[in-house]
Image (tube, rainbow, N blue to C red):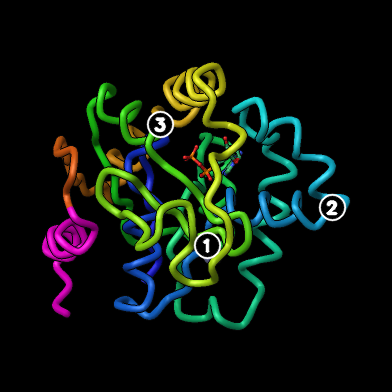
Amino acid sequence: MRLVVIGPPGSGKGTYASRLSPILKVPYISTGDIFRENISKGTSLGKKVEKFLNSGLLVPDDITIEVVKKRLKEPDCKNGYIFDGFPRTLKQAEELEKIASPDVVLYLSVPEWLLIKRISSRVICKNCGKIYNLLNVKPKKEGICDVCEGELIQRKDETPEAIKIRLNEYEKKTKPIIEYYNNKGILKIFSNDKLDLKPEEGVKKILEILGVRK
Ligand code: ADP
Ligand code: ZN
Protein backbone atom coordinates (compact mmCIF):
# COMPACT_ATOMS: atom_id res chain seq x y z
CA MET A 1 0.00 0.00 0.00
CA ARG A 2 1.09 3.55 -0.71
CA LEU A 3 -0.40 5.76 1.95
CA VAL A 4 0.04 9.47 2.53
CA VAL A 5 -1.02 10.92 5.89
CA ILE A 6 -1.65 14.65 5.89
CA GLY A 7 -2.86 17.04 8.52
CA PRO A 8 -1.81 20.15 10.40
CA PRO A 9 1.00 20.09 12.96
CA GLY A 10 -0.31 18.37 16.08
CA SER A 11 -2.98 16.38 14.23
CA GLY A 12 -1.33 13.08 15.13
CA LYS A 13 0.34 12.23 11.81
CA GLY A 14 3.39 10.70 13.41
CA THR A 15 1.43 8.94 16.13
CA TYR A 16 -0.87 7.16 13.71
CA ALA A 17 1.40 6.72 10.71
CA SER A 18 4.15 5.08 12.79
CA ARG A 19 1.65 2.68 14.38
CA LEU A 20 0.08 1.80 11.03
CA SER A 21 3.44 0.81 9.55
CA PRO A 22 3.78 -2.66 11.19
CA ILE A 23 0.09 -3.39 10.53
CA LEU A 24 0.19 -2.46 6.84
CA LYS A 25 3.75 -3.83 6.51
CA VAL A 26 5.17 -0.85 4.69
CA PRO A 27 7.88 1.50 5.98
CA TYR A 28 7.04 4.64 7.92
CA ILE A 29 8.73 7.64 6.35
CA SER A 30 8.72 11.01 8.09
CA THR A 31 10.53 13.80 6.27
CA GLY A 32 10.55 15.77 9.54
CA ASP A 33 12.39 12.87 11.26
CA ILE A 34 14.88 12.60 8.40
CA PHE A 35 15.61 16.32 8.63
CA ARG A 36 15.94 16.27 12.45
CA GLU A 37 18.27 13.26 12.29
CA ASN A 38 20.49 15.05 9.80
CA ILE A 39 20.52 18.18 11.94
CA SER A 40 21.55 16.27 15.03
CA LYS A 41 24.30 14.45 13.10
CA GLY A 42 25.50 17.72 11.58
CA THR A 43 25.41 16.47 7.96
CA SER A 44 25.50 18.90 5.04
CA LEU A 45 21.76 18.33 4.53
CA GLY A 46 21.24 19.06 8.21
CA LYS A 47 23.13 22.34 7.93
CA LYS A 48 21.04 23.36 4.92
CA VAL A 49 17.66 22.72 6.56
CA GLU A 50 18.25 23.66 10.19
CA LYS A 51 17.11 27.29 9.91
CA PHE A 52 13.83 26.28 8.28
CA LEU A 53 12.97 23.70 10.93
CA ASN A 54 13.89 25.93 13.84
CA SER A 55 11.73 28.78 12.59
CA GLY A 56 8.78 26.58 11.54
CA LEU A 57 9.05 27.30 7.82
CA LEU A 58 8.85 24.59 5.17
CA VAL A 59 12.12 23.33 3.70
CA PRO A 60 12.39 24.28 -0.03
CA ASP A 61 10.79 21.77 -2.40
CA ASP A 62 13.94 20.84 -4.33
CA ILE A 63 15.75 19.75 -1.15
CA THR A 64 12.73 17.83 0.18
CA ILE A 65 12.02 16.07 -3.11
CA GLU A 66 15.61 14.94 -3.44
CA VAL A 67 15.51 13.44 0.07
CA VAL A 68 12.30 11.55 -0.71
CA LYS A 69 13.53 10.24 -4.06
CA LYS A 70 16.61 8.81 -2.36
CA ARG A 71 14.54 7.24 0.44
CA LEU A 72 12.12 5.58 -2.00
CA LYS A 73 15.03 3.82 -3.71
CA GLU A 74 15.72 1.80 -0.54
CA PRO A 75 14.66 -1.84 -0.87
CA ASP A 76 12.13 -1.68 2.00
CA CYS A 77 9.91 0.56 -0.17
CA LYS A 78 9.24 -2.11 -2.77
CA ASN A 79 5.76 -2.83 -1.38
CA GLY A 80 4.84 0.77 -0.69
CA TYR A 81 5.18 3.42 1.99
CA ILE A 82 3.45 5.46 4.64
CA PHE A 83 4.41 9.11 4.40
CA ASP A 84 4.11 11.38 7.41
CA GLY A 85 4.60 15.00 6.45
CA PHE A 86 5.14 14.50 2.74
CA PRO A 87 3.89 15.86 0.37
CA ARG A 88 3.33 19.26 1.91
CA THR A 89 3.04 21.45 -1.20
CA LEU A 90 1.35 21.03 -4.58
CA LYS A 91 4.75 20.83 -6.23
CA GLN A 92 5.73 17.92 -3.93
CA ALA A 93 2.43 16.16 -4.64
CA GLU A 94 2.99 16.47 -8.38
CA GLU A 95 6.53 15.13 -8.07
CA LEU A 96 5.30 12.14 -6.04
CA GLU A 97 2.84 11.31 -8.85
CA LYS A 98 5.83 10.90 -11.16
CA ILE A 99 7.75 8.55 -8.84
CA ALA A 100 5.22 6.47 -6.90
CA SER A 101 1.68 7.85 -6.76
CA PRO A 102 -0.28 7.13 -3.55
CA ASP A 103 -3.28 4.74 -3.43
CA VAL A 104 -4.87 6.50 -0.47
CA VAL A 105 -4.46 9.86 1.24
CA LEU A 106 -5.63 10.05 4.83
CA TYR A 107 -6.48 13.54 6.03
CA LEU A 108 -6.46 14.06 9.80
CA SER A 109 -8.95 16.81 10.54
CA VAL A 110 -8.54 18.42 13.96
CA PRO A 111 -9.89 21.76 15.25
CA GLU A 112 -7.27 24.45 15.76
CA TRP A 113 -7.75 24.90 19.53
CA LEU A 114 -6.91 21.23 19.97
CA LEU A 115 -3.81 21.43 17.77
CA ILE A 116 -2.33 24.16 19.91
CA LYS A 117 -3.14 22.29 23.10
CA ARG A 118 -1.59 19.08 21.78
CA ILE A 119 1.56 20.66 20.44
CA SER A 120 2.28 22.51 23.62
CA SER A 121 2.06 19.33 25.69
CA ARG A 122 4.33 17.34 23.41
CA VAL A 123 7.85 16.24 24.31
CA ILE A 124 10.42 14.27 22.32
CA CYS A 125 13.27 11.98 23.37
CA LYS A 126 16.57 13.78 22.79
CA ASN A 127 18.22 10.44 22.11
CA CYS A 128 15.88 8.24 20.01
CA GLY A 129 13.24 10.71 18.81
CA LYS A 130 10.24 8.96 20.34
CA ILE A 131 7.35 11.36 20.87
CA TYR A 132 5.30 11.59 24.06
CA ASN A 133 2.30 13.67 24.89
CA LEU A 134 1.54 14.62 28.44
CA LEU A 135 -2.19 14.43 27.59
CA ASN A 136 -2.45 10.89 26.27
CA VAL A 137 0.94 9.23 25.73
CA LYS A 138 2.74 9.83 29.01
CA PRO A 139 6.19 8.41 29.73
CA LYS A 140 6.37 5.97 32.66
CA LYS A 141 8.91 8.19 34.42
CA GLU A 142 8.51 11.94 34.11
CA GLY A 143 11.04 13.49 31.73
CA ILE A 144 12.61 10.14 30.78
CA CYS A 145 12.15 8.02 27.64
CA ASP A 146 10.56 4.57 28.22
CA VAL A 147 12.59 3.05 25.40
CA CYS A 148 16.12 4.34 25.91
CA GLU A 149 16.02 6.42 29.13
CA GLY A 150 17.01 9.51 27.10
CA GLU A 151 16.01 12.96 28.27
CA LEU A 152 12.60 14.24 27.11
CA ILE A 153 12.73 17.78 25.75
CA GLN A 154 10.53 20.23 23.85
CA ARG A 155 11.18 20.58 20.13
CA LYS A 156 12.85 23.83 19.06
CA ASP A 157 9.94 24.60 16.75
CA GLU A 158 7.40 24.29 19.56
CA THR A 159 7.71 27.80 20.89
CA PRO A 160 4.49 29.83 20.46
CA GLU A 161 6.03 31.86 17.59
CA ALA A 162 7.24 28.81 15.65
CA ILE A 163 3.90 27.04 16.18
CA LYS A 164 2.12 30.03 14.66
CA ILE A 165 4.41 29.97 11.63
CA ARG A 166 3.93 26.21 11.19
CA LEU A 167 0.13 26.51 11.28
CA ASN A 168 0.33 29.38 8.81
CA GLU A 169 2.59 27.39 6.45
CA TYR A 170 0.10 24.55 6.66
CA GLU A 171 -2.87 26.79 5.80
CA LYS A 172 -1.08 28.46 2.92
CA LYS A 173 0.91 25.65 1.31
CA THR A 174 -0.36 22.27 2.48
CA LYS A 175 -4.14 22.70 2.63
CA PRO A 176 -4.47 23.04 -1.18
CA ILE A 177 -3.25 19.45 -1.64
CA ILE A 178 -6.33 18.15 0.18
CA GLU A 179 -8.44 19.45 -2.69
CA TYR A 180 -5.93 18.02 -5.18
CA TYR A 181 -6.26 14.50 -3.76
CA ASN A 182 -10.01 14.85 -3.27
CA ASN A 183 -10.32 15.55 -6.99
CA LYS A 184 -8.37 12.37 -7.69
CA GLY A 185 -10.94 10.48 -5.60
CA ILE A 186 -8.41 8.98 -3.15
CA LEU A 187 -9.00 11.17 -0.09
CA LYS A 188 -10.25 9.66 3.20
CA ILE A 189 -10.94 11.76 6.26
CA PHE A 190 -10.48 10.98 9.94
CA SER A 191 -11.96 13.69 12.15
CA ASN A 192 -10.80 13.80 15.73
CA ASP A 193 -11.85 16.46 18.21
CA LYS A 194 -11.04 14.54 21.37
CA LEU A 195 -8.33 15.78 23.67
CA ASP A 196 -7.22 12.43 25.02
CA LEU A 197 -8.03 9.80 22.40
CA LYS A 198 -5.65 6.89 22.93
CA PRO A 199 -3.45 6.19 19.91
CA GLU A 200 -4.72 2.57 19.68
CA GLU A 201 -8.32 3.80 19.50
CA GLY A 202 -7.45 6.21 16.71
CA VAL A 203 -5.59 3.48 14.81
CA LYS A 204 -8.64 1.21 15.05
CA LYS A 205 -10.89 3.89 13.58
CA ILE A 206 -8.40 4.65 10.83
CA LEU A 207 -8.18 0.98 9.82
CA GLU A 208 -11.98 0.98 9.51
CA ILE A 209 -11.85 4.11 7.36
CA LEU A 210 -9.16 2.54 5.17
CA GLY A 211 -11.16 -0.69 4.95
CA VAL A 212 -8.27 -2.75 6.31
CA ARG A 213 -8.83 -5.80 8.50
CA LYS A 214 -6.17 -6.45 11.10
P1 ADP B 1 4.80 18.87 12.17
O1 ADP B 1 3.90 18.29 11.13
O2 ADP B 1 4.32 18.60 13.54
O3 ADP B 1 5.07 20.34 11.96
P2 ADP B 1 7.17 17.45 11.10
O4 ADP B 1 8.13 16.69 11.91
O5 ADP B 1 6.38 16.73 10.09
O6 ADP B 1 6.23 18.20 12.16
O7 ADP B 1 7.94 18.63 10.36
C1 ADP B 1 8.83 19.48 11.03
C2 ADP B 1 9.49 20.47 10.08
O8 ADP B 1 10.25 19.77 9.09
C3 ADP B 1 8.53 21.34 9.28
O9 ADP B 1 8.12 22.48 10.01
C4 ADP B 1 9.41 21.70 8.08
O10 ADP B 1 10.36 22.69 8.42
C5 ADP B 1 10.18 20.42 7.83
N1 ADP B 1 9.49 19.51 6.88
C6 ADP B 1 9.05 18.25 7.12
N2 ADP B 1 8.48 17.70 6.03
C7 ADP B 1 8.55 18.64 5.06
C8 ADP B 1 8.12 18.70 3.69
N3 ADP B 1 7.49 17.67 3.10
N4 ADP B 1 8.36 19.84 3.01
C9 ADP B 1 8.99 20.88 3.56
N5 ADP B 1 9.41 20.91 4.83
C10 ADP B 1 9.21 19.80 5.59
ZN1 ZN C 1 14.39 7.46 23.68
Q: Within the magenta stretch, is there residue 167?
A: no
Say which residue appears at 59% left-offset and 28% top-offset: 56
- Front of the two marks 1 and 3: 3
Q: Which residue is mark 1?
A: 29
| Rendered-image quarter of ligand 2 | bottom right
User: In this view of the protein, which residue sits in the foreground, 149 or 42?
Assistant: 149
Residue at disc 3, secondary structure: helix
Amino acid type of disc 1?
Ile
Magenta stretch, main secondary structure, is helix
Say which residue appears at 14% left-offset and 77% top-offset: 213
Q: Which residue is mark 2?
A: 42
Mark 1–mark 2 Cα distance, whole angstroms, equals 20 Å
Quarter the N terminus occupies: bottom left
User: In this view of the protein, which residue sits in the foreground, 142 or 34?
Assistant: 142
Amino acid type of disc 3?
Ser
Mark 3–mark 2 Cα distance, whole angstroms, equals 27 Å
Q: Is mark 1 within 8 Å of ligand 1?
A: no
Determine whether, in the image, residue 82 is placed left or right of residue 161.
Answer: left
Mark 1–mark 3 Cα distance, whole angstroms, equals 24 Å
Amino acid type of disc 2?
Gly
Q: Residue 110: x, y in percent?
A: 24, 33
Q: Which residues are magenta?
A: 198-214
Residue at disc 2, secondary structure: loop
Q: Which mark is residue 120?
A: 3
Quarter the C terminus occupies: bottom left
